[in-house]
Amino acid sequence: MSPVLVATTPDDESVPLGPVLSIFDPVHIGIDEFGHPVQVPMIYRNMLIGGEPGAGKSALLNAVVAHAALSLDCRLCLLDGKQVELGQWRHCADAFVGPSLDGALGLLRRLAVMMDRRYAYLLDCERRKVVADDKSMSAYLMAIDEIAYFSATAGKKPEREEFASLLRDLVARGRAVGIIVVAATQRPSSDIIPTSLRDLFAWRFAGRCTTDSSSDIVLGHGWAQQGWTANTISPTNPGAGLLIAEGGSPQLVKVAYLDDGTCAAIAGYAATLRDTVAAKRRRLQAAA
């Protein structure tokens, strides 16, 4: 059972607010072809989401962000070239960047500095990774909607190359210090998702793609030849896609869908939980 967050009134009366999650809990993302729930552990892992428009990318991205928003041991950093896909979660986030490559670069640079400092701390403590009961280091979820805007469209080539380099570094080294990257694109091509980046993602989801090669760019080379291709998914079946984990085989899943009203309700609830915790922390600091 999820723990219940309790707020304290000025009269020191405890008021239960509701259940909270943990980023160390598996994330529910939908059901498999037999109707069984599909849950994926996200801590120490990253996720790549690709597919044509309407394939279910945003649904999966929002499902993961919703879990993270309700996890008070996780902080959110959001990049959204369109602003509206992740915009409802901006009040829950430590950082929200819209269509600004400069803003995205600044955020990635700050995360890179934090990552290096966390590794230095773990080294001093003779440890290898953050754990669930770490009070000094919250996990971070870095969610990106439409990688292509930042890596291939906006700004100048040196800036786009810096974005790709910083992102690759976070995906490669961030896991042990609690940095989780979830990135989505509607243009699964080799210039957007090079093999060197794709293979760093533990979880990869391919919604409907227009070609076998696009499906392979997300899932990995050779899966289409073995009969696993997102090109065969019907356009009338949005949210269906192939999910693969490190060292595993693809499985067909149907992603859970959160409509705008549901996302707004969850985001508002999560923002209230986070504001309550922040206020309590300030009171404790003032009392000390």
Image (cartoon, helix red, strand yellow):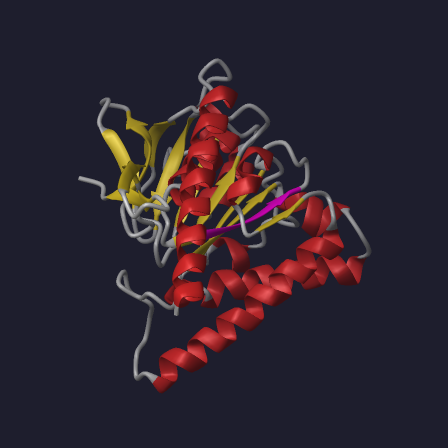
- Quarter of the image for residue 68 reads top left
* Residue at (60% x, 35% y) in the render: 87
The residue closer to the viewer here, 217 or 138, is 138
Q: Is residue 285 above or below residue 76?
A: below
Q: Nearer the viewer, residue 156 or 75?
A: 75
Tell me if I can see residue 222 in this picture: no
Give the residue drawn at x 24%, y 22%: 35
Q: In the figure, is residue 200 to the left or right of 113?
A: left
Q: Quadrant of the C terminus?
A: bottom left
Please name the predominant secondary structure of the magenta segment in the image. strand
- Extreme front residue here? 11
Residue 30 x %, y %: 33, 29
Residue 257: in sight, yes or no? yes
- Name which residue lies at 39% across and 34% down: 242
Choose top left, top right, bottom left or bottom right for residue 146. top right
Q: In the figure, 236 relative to 246: above or below?
A: above
**In the picture provided, is 287 more to the left or to the right than 167?**
left
Magenta region, residue range = 75-80
Q: Is residue 1 left or right of residue 225?
A: left
User: Dividing the image into 4 quarters, which one contains the N terminus?
Assistant: top left
- Numbered disc total: 0
